Structures are given as structure tokens and as C-alpha cells.
Image: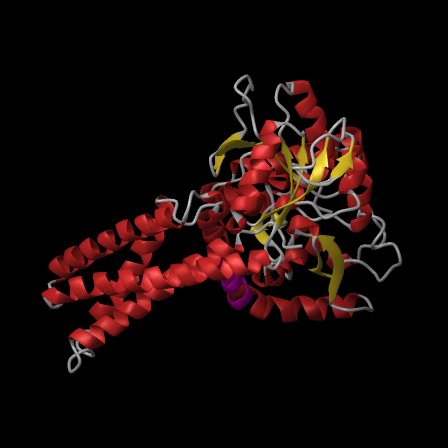
């Protein structure tokens, strides 16, 4: 099963940027075959400008938003042509103010070539994606709750539009009475047990007249499994402010929580920041700090310099999380959290944990893509098993990448979890972050993290 990642949109963005750059270079060489090396600096700056303009134009114009639910290929071409017009105007404006004029015919040749190249590129990607999804790749597996006309329309839309990339596993309802939807999976109360046994990406509620109370009950069960929910509402549906409306073909749906990081440009911004920030930390700090800490750890106790432990990442995918070893080697490291006065912590380990220096190897996790600079802190496997049984929406945290620091941590919920109140509040803060992410919120969290380190925290042990 493919993970719930908009990888196709990212491929389309990279392909478009490549077309903008390669077409620019080819047209320069065509228009100025003998002088294409003149004013290389100006031409390079213009290219960078065009790439930035295309990126911001495309994301603002929602060219890369949720490709599965867009009306069609023709709308994508229309938005692409609008972007090409903006690029042409950019060339004129930049050339005018920089006084580095390209030949007049360059703008027309470049624009016409872009239209041809983009049309070809987008058609190829469109056909490739269609073939992949017909072969069963890059599909989102969904379950439908309900068996009426709304559910039939939804299934009809999916079956007639394979490019959307959805696969209906079957439906749950109180009675088996509609073969048009797919296999009957059982009564609604069996949904929770089913989600534990089968990989499911979304649950679609298509039950006319369903009450808010029933929706909350279903959401409780689905959140417990860490699966997304969509609702196809009828005219009497009462919307919550936190719900997000999306058009699925010609059928309206409601996502039960806003997720800014599901937008391609937001994911691109966050990932770019993660890579740049982690590279700078690794080169400027870890390059000299690692050997110093490694020597101190080795002098203080026997054992490896790094401690690694399996943690749960985005979409419940496990990864190896790295830290500087701050404890004596023991058999309880995978079972018991560090606590105040913990005798397992070494003398140098106390300093590392107090200053959060033990977390620095996780910048390698960020660079690898397992983690982000900011996000919900990853917990031990034994904690995940324990808390998902007592907190229904605990696994919602796993819809985004875990972080080195997070909104819960800068609000006082870091370190040891002493009672259920602590973990419930941590989950509440983590889900709030998921629903309210912004680039400047990440900057704020990083600032507060550094401030708290210098200020000192009670639970930093």
C-alpha cells in the first residue's frame, strides 16, 4: 500500500521546474548561438528568478494541490498557460530594469516552446500515473459507510475516473443490500476491528441524515486507528469550523481536520527548511561537537557513543532514532523512560540531557527524511502501544513527521510522562500543531526551544 503522501504532485512540481530551466537554456543557445556565454551572471539570475516565479505562481494558483480531486487535465493546462504568461512578463520586466536586454524574439520563442514542452510533459506524466494506478500502484484504499444513492455516486465517480487513484475495499452498513458499491464488510460496529486487520487510507461516510453524535462515534473509532475520515454531507449537515471542504470531482466532501502540511507547497517549504537547517547544524556545530561529546561519553562509561531506538514516524512507519548515549548500558532502555534522579544516567549524560545536546544526532534523522526539525516528539514503541489504548486520537500524531522539538515541548510537556493528564495534553498540543501549522509557527517553536534551554526546564533530566 502506498503511504498517504502526495508524491505525484511533488514529481510534477520538480518536472515543471526542470522544463522551465532546460527550455530557458535551450532557447538562449538557439537565439544567441554565438553569444550565449555573454553576461552569464545576468542570465543565471534571470533563470533563478523564473524558477522562483514559477514556484510561487504554481502554488498560489493551486496547480499542485491534491491532484486526485481536480476536475481534469484541461484545467491543469489552462493554469499552466497562465503561469507561462507570467514568466513572459517577468522576462520583460527583469530585462528592462537590469538593462540586460535579450532579443525581442526570445520571449516569444521561449513562451511557445514552454507551451509545447509543458503539454508534452504533463500528458506523459498524466498517462504514466494512469497506468500506474490501473496496475494497482499509488492507490488510496477506502471504506464506505453507507449504501444509499450517495455511496453509489461516489463509487461510480471512482470507477469512471481511475486517474483519481482510489480503490474501494467495500462498505459497512447495518444491512447488506447494495452490490453496486462493492463487497459488504459487515455492520458499522465491526469497523474498528476491520481497521486493525487491513491497510486503509480513508473512511468515507456516505450516510444521508447521519447525526453529529454518530459522526463523533465513527471519528472516535477511526482516529484510534490513525486513519483519515471524509464525509459526503447532505444539505442538513452541520459543519464544524475545523472541518475542511474539498470538491471530489463533482461531489462535495469534508475532511474532519485541516492539515496544512498536506498541501504540496507547504511540504516543500518545510522539507527545504529541514534540509538547509540540518545541513548547517551538522557542518557548523556537529562537525566539531561530535568528537568532543564522543570522547566524554567514552571516558565516562563503557558502551557506544550513539544510542539508537526504533520509533514510530509518519503514517506509523518505524525508523531508527539516534541520540548521544546518556545512560549506562542497561536492559530497560526500551521499556522505561528516564525519570528524575534516574541512576541509569551517566554524569556527562545529565549535562547532555539538561542542555538537549543528546538530541543533536537527530539532525541526521531530519536530513534522511525520517524526522522534521519541528513536530510531535516520537515515543518508544511500548508507549505507543500503551497510549493508543487509552487515548482515542493518539495515532493522529503520526499523520505528520515527528520532530526534534514540538509545540507540546515548548508548552511544558517534555520529558517524563508522569500521568494520563500529561500525555492527553501532549497529544492535544500535537494535534493542534498538525491543524495549525505555518512556517512562522515552526520558527517560533525553534526560538522558544533555544530560549527554554538557556532558561532551564524542570523536566530536562
Provide residue 426's location: percent of width, then percent of height: 68, 36
Magenta range: 275-283
Provide residue 80's location: percent of width, then percent of height: 32, 52
Relative height, residue 353 to residue 17 (above, below)? above
**Quadrant of the snapshot with the N terminus:** bottom right
User: Which corner quadrant of the image does residue 302 belong to?
Assistant: bottom right
Provide residue 396's location: percent of width, then percent of height: 66, 39
* Outermost residue to the right: 331
Q: Nearer the viewer, residue 274 or 231?
A: 231
Provide residue 124's location: percent of width, then percent of height: 42, 63
- Can residue 257 be seen by looking at this rendering? yes
* Image position of 69 (left or right of 316): left
Identified at 64% across, 52% down, the residue is: 355
Instruction: Tell me if residue 26 is in the magenta stretch.
Output: no
User: Which corner quadrant of the image does residue 109 belong to?
Assistant: bottom left
- Can residue 339 be seen by looking at this rendering? no
Instruction: Tell me if residue 277 is in the magenta stretch.
Output: yes
Relative height, residue 309 to residue 27 (above, below)? above
Relative height, residue 422 to residue 32 (above, below)? above
* Image position of 86 (left or right of 269): left
Majority secondary structure of the magenta segment?
helix
Question: Coloured how?
Answer: secondary structure
Identified at 74% across, 62% down, the residue is: 308
Q: Nearer the viewer, residue 106 or 351?
A: 106
Amino acid at each position: 500500500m502506498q503511504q498517504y503522501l502526495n508524491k505525484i504532485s511533488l514529481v510534477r512540481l520538480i518536472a515543471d521546474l526542470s522544463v522551465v530551466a532546460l527550455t530557458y537554456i535551450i532557447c538562449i543557445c538557439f537565439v544567441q548561438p554565438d553569444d550565449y556565454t555573454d553576461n552569464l551572471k545576468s542570465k543565471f539570475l534571470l533563470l533563478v528568478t523564473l524558477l522562483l516565479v514559477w514556484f510561487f505562481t504554481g502554488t498560489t494558483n493551486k496547480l499542485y494541490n491534491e491532484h486526485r480531486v481536480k476536475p481534469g487535465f484541461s484545467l491543469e493546462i489552462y493554469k499552466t498557460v497562465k503561469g507561462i504568461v507570467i514568466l513572459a512578463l517577468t522576462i520583460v520586466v527583469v530585462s528592462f530594469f537590469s538593462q540586460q536586454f535579450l532579443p525581442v524574439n526570445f520571449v516569444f520563442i521561449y513562451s511557445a516552446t514552454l507551451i509545447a514542452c509543458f503539454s508534452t510533459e504533463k500528458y506523459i506524466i498524466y498517462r504514466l500515473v494512469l497506468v500506474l494506478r490501473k496496475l494497482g500502484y499509488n492507490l488510496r484504499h477506502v471504506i464506505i459507510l453507507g449504501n444509499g444513492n450517495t455511496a453509489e455516486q461516489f463509487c461510480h465517480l471512482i470507477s469512471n475516473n481511475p486517474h483519481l487513484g482510489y480503490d474501494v475495499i467495500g462498505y459497512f452498513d447495518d444491512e447488506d443490500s447494495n452490490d453496486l458499491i462493492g463487497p459488504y464488510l459487515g455492520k458499522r460496529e465491526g469497523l474498528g476491528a476491520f481497521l486493525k486487520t487491513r491497510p486503509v487510507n480513508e473512511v468515507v461516510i456516505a450516510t444521508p441524515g447521519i447525526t453529529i453524535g454518530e459522526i463523533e462515534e465513527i471519528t472516535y473509532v477511526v482516529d484510534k486507528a490513525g486513519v483519515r475520515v471524509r464525509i459526503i454531507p447532505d444539505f442538513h449537515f452541520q459543519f464544524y469550523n475545523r472541518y475542511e471542504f474539498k470538491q471530489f470531482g463533482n461531489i462535495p466532501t469534508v475532511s474532519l481536520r485541516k492539515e496544512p502540511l498536506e498541501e504540496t507547497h507547504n511540504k516543500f517549504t518545510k522539507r527545504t527548511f529541514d534540509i538547509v537547517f540540518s545541513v548547517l547544524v551538522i557542518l557548523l556545530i556537529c562537525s566539531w561537537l561530535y568528537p568532543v561529546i564522543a570522547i566524554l561519553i567514552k571516558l565516562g562509561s563503557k558502551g557506544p557513543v550513539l544510542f539508537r531506538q526504533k520509533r514510530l514516524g509518519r503514517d506509523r512507519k518505524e525508523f531508527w532514532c539516534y541520540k548521544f548515549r546518556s545512560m549506562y548500558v542497561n536492559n530497560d532502555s526500551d521499556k522505561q523512560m528516564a525519570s528524575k534522579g534516574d541512576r541509569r544516567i551517566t554524569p556527562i549524560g545529565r549535562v547532555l540531557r539538561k542542555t538537549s545536546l543528546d538530541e543533536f544526532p537527530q539532525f541526521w534523522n531530519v536530513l534522511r527524511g525520517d524526522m522534521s526539525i519541528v513536530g510531535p516528539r516520537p515515543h518508544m514503541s511500548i508507549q505507543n502501544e500503551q497510549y493508543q489504548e487509552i487515548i482515542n486520537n493518539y495515532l493522529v500524531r503520526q499523520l505528520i513527521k515527528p520532530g526534534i522539538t514540538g509545540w507540546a515541548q515548548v508548552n511544558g510537556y517534555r520529558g517524563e510522562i508522569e500521568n494520563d493528564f500529561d500525555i492527553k495534553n501532549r497529544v492535544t498540543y500535537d494535534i493542534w500543531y498538525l491543524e495549525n501549522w505555518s512556517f512562522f509557527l515552526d520558527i517560533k517553536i525553534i526560538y522558544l526551544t533555544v530560549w527554554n534551554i538557556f532558561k532551564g526546564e524542570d523536566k530536562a533530566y
